[in-house]
Every structure is written in structure tokens, then in C-alpha cells.
Image: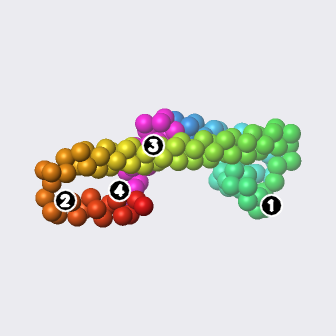
Amino acid sequence: MKRLKILKEVLKRTHADRIILGFVIFFLLDALVILLVEPGITTYWDAIWYCYSVFSTVGFGDLTSVSIIGRILSIILTIYTILVVALVTGVIVAFYNDIVAMKYKASKAELLDKLEHLEDLSKEELAEISERIRKIS
């Protein structure tokens, strides 16, 4: 649950949630247009199923596009999906790397501060520093 909250916060801070929302809206509109132009797709749920099989690149083959507009929309949906997945993944990875780097810098600064004040540290704190330095080397 905590990881989902972090993910939600990352998506909000980076505005990737807008990219995802735009994709969902495009997906639903694409399904509507597919329903209107494809003779073999007769219900909105079939159009959504078709768009799902296109965007997931599974291509089940149970529903296929035969019109030019349907094929063009299928191509656009596939390209859009690839871009959204790449963008959102990149945003999340970059944000995670920034968090790791910040934690590393904070930890390093704390260790250096303790090293500068060795005479003020207790035996337990000295043992902790010694252990941390052994792990580093």
C-alpha cells in the first residue's frame, strides 16, 4: 500500500498522471471511433477489447480492423502506447534514482559530520561508524 502511495505521488509530481489520463481518454475515444467505422465490431465492449489487444500488442485476432481509418487508429494507438509506457517508466526510474542519490548524500554528510567530531562520540557511535566504513570498503 505504501509503494502505491509513493507511485501515485511520483506520478503527480512529475505530471505523468496527466500523460496516463490523456492515454485513457484517447483509448476510450479510439474505441468509440473503431466502433463507428469497423463493420465487424458491433458493441462498444468489443471495440474496447479490440483496442486492448492492439495496445497490449497481443493481437488476439478475434477482432480485426478492415477499414483504413480503423487501421490508422490502430497504428496510432500502438505508437501512443509505446510512448506512454516509455515516458512513464523513465519518469519513475529517474525519480527513484534521485531519491536514492539524495539518501546517499544525506548519509554521507552525516558520516562525515560524525568523523569530524570523533572525540564527542560514545563507544556505540564509534562502533557504528567503524561498521559503516567496513561495509563501504
Tell me where residue 28 appears, x and y as whole percent: 62, 43
Badge 2: residue crowd in 10 Å (few <14, some 14–19, many ≥20):
few
Residue range highlighted in magenta: 1-17
Is residue 78 visible in the rendered structure shown here?
yes
Whether residue 69 sits left or right of residue 90 in the image: it is right
Quadrant where the N terminus lies? bottom left
Residue that carries the numbered disc 3 in the rendered image: 98
The residue that disc 1 covers is 61
Q: Which residue is mark 2?
A: 125
Residue under label 4: 2
Out of 62 and 3, give the one closest to the viewer: 3
Front of the two marks 1 and 4:
4
- Give the left or right position of residue 92, taking residue 112 as reference: right
Which of pointers 4 and 3 lies earlier in the amino acid sequence?
4
Q: Does residue 126 appear to the left or right of 95 in the view shown?
A: left
Q: Give the mark toward the camera: 4 or 3.
A: 3
